[in-house]
Image (cartoon, rainbow, N blue to C red):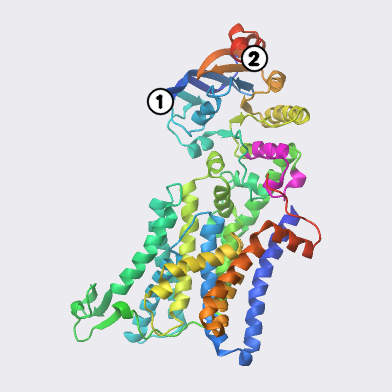
Amino acid sequence: MKDNKKVVLNVESLSISFGGLKAVSDFDIKIYKNEVYGLIGPNGAGKTTIFNLLTGVYRPDSGEILLDGENIVGKDCVQINKIGIARTFQNIRLFGKLSVLDNVKVAMHESYKYNILEGIFRLPNYYKKEKDMDEEAIKLLKVFGIDDLADVISTNLPYGKQRKLEIARALATKPKLLLLDEPAAGMNENETKELMNTILKVRDEFDMTILLIEHDMKLIKGICERITVLNFGSVLASGNLDDVLNNEEVIKAYLGA
Amino acid sequence: MNRLYNKKFIDKSITFLMIIFLYVIITLFDKNVSSLLRGLLVQFCVYSIMAVSLNLVVGISGELSLGHVGFMCIGAFVSAGFTTYMRSVLNVESIFIFIISIFLGAFVTAVFGFIVGIPVLRLKGDYLAIVTLAFGEIIKNILNAIYLGFDSKGVHVSLKNELQLGLESDGYTLIKGPLGITSIPHYSNFLIGVILLLIVIFIIYNIIDQRTGRAIMALRDNRIAGESIGLNVTKYKLIAFTISSAFAGVAGVLYAHNYNNLAATGAKFGYNMSIMVLVFVVLGGMGNIRGSIISAVILTLLPEALRSLQDYRMLMYAVVLIAVMIFTNAPAAINFRKNLKFGKGKLKDER
């Protein structure tokens, strides 16, 4: 059905073990352009490890990760971000002492360049680039409805808005693929609903491909078309949402009868 | 958003105006200024520059450096060697020589900062503190032992004594071991100090408030998140550290040309002085440029002002230090001050 669509991420037989413990073994995934893909599984199944493998925090023992056809195995975090994967973290990691605006602007450092001397002596290029950066950052913050908080120090934001800012910051690096690690963790029902709308809005407005880890089945059912269930580091089931959720093994291992 | 820019602009302006105001006051009332204070004026500038530059590493970049005075020492010796050579051998003495020596001191120190920084800043953790601590002591000890002289055949270096240099009759010994460099031309004065301080602050403010500075502060706040958005950790930490050491070199240049003789004694360039400068930074507030200057001036003045207490001097010094620490950093004290000033905006509880 999806064969006519472009594959953004193609992972084949990815494995890593930490001192004899197989954290992830033979993990495969294929994500198409403009898709919201869910990765679920019990605690300790290896979901975050997969994110760390995709973003270059860990180097896989074996397997291939192709982003837009380019093999990114062996590259470090910085290089992989430049190639086009951005992520958020399970426990929010903002630049706490910087303002909301600066949190986004620092993520744009690759797209708006001027050298340090132009900045020190405030040459025209500095003002031009800073102005462009401000405009784009505000535009981005508007999508998340936090543009009026631009000058607030990011630690002082309420929890839900910190989550949004983290997604905005990841998007500011202009990725091809966005990884969200438990975006709804610690949110109440209303906040989760709002988050679901935000994620869909991000997909449509930025033409983004999204892979997310989540425990909240409501969110998964609400926005994911296809999901993969992970158990003890290997794929238990994957495919269309309904098929997977009705799979007996999945019900036994994760959902519960 | 404009609010943010106005706030930053006002904050910077206050710092500049504060320094200029102090300068004007002291110059206007020159006759009433005590000789004690007059002798300290250049030192205020020297230690303000030291504090501000160390703040770039400790406060802005979030790394601990315990050998900042080592860089000051290099700047002092390189520049004083240059100006003294120019005067004694070539008979040139002008303010341009001094300006060249400032750039020379800053450049050589920056090179040292870069070399020290490369291996250390690739590591995570407190390695920078350990290495800089050792570096500061090594520099001090080497400069205490080195003899360096010139003659028609070129440069002679010895680590034993002056005779070992084997200079010809036209030779000239520049660095005389523990005696250091003698008869240095006296270029430094309060005006030059203030101008250098203003330039250094201007540059540091403009580094903080730009692409590079944002990246440096982002990596301080969260290294992992910084890497995830494509910031090169080593590069930005190294930039901060190199610039910081260059400014320490400038402070050294100013310091050296305030005295006739320059020797790498423990009291002036030892470990204790590095800790002193760190105290300036911590007391003034991490990342707070104006705070660094204020605390550098006050803590340079305090031991001299307390001289009448004789034996109890350092005791009082410690008590004042602790009191100020509590007043500036304890949450209760911060709330108290905020209530005093605005009657609102209490400190929020940390999550």
Could you say which is closer to the camera, residue B188 or residue B101?
Answer: B188
Q: Is residue B209 visible?
A: yes
Q: Give the residue furthest to the top.
A: A248
Q: Is residue A154 magenta?
A: yes
At horizontal 41% and vertical 56% (from top left) the residue drawn is B130
Residue placed under numbered mark 1 in the picture? A61
Q: Is residue B293 visible?
A: no
Badge 1 density bin: few <14, some 14–19, many ≥20, Cα 10 Å = some
Task: Tell me where the magenta segment starts and ends, as one range.
Answer: A147-169
Pick the quarter of the image with the C terminus of chain B: top right
Q: Give the residue furthest to the bottom.
A: B31
Badge 2 density bin: few <14, some 14–19, many ≥20, Cα 10 Å = some
Amino acid on which the number 1 mark rests in the picture: Asp
Where is residue B135 drawn, in percent x and y? 37, 62
Residue placed under numbered mark 2 in the picture? A255
Q: Is residue A6 magenta?
A: no
Amino acid on which the number 2 mark rests in the picture: Leu
Where is residue A77 drawn, in percent x and y? 49, 37
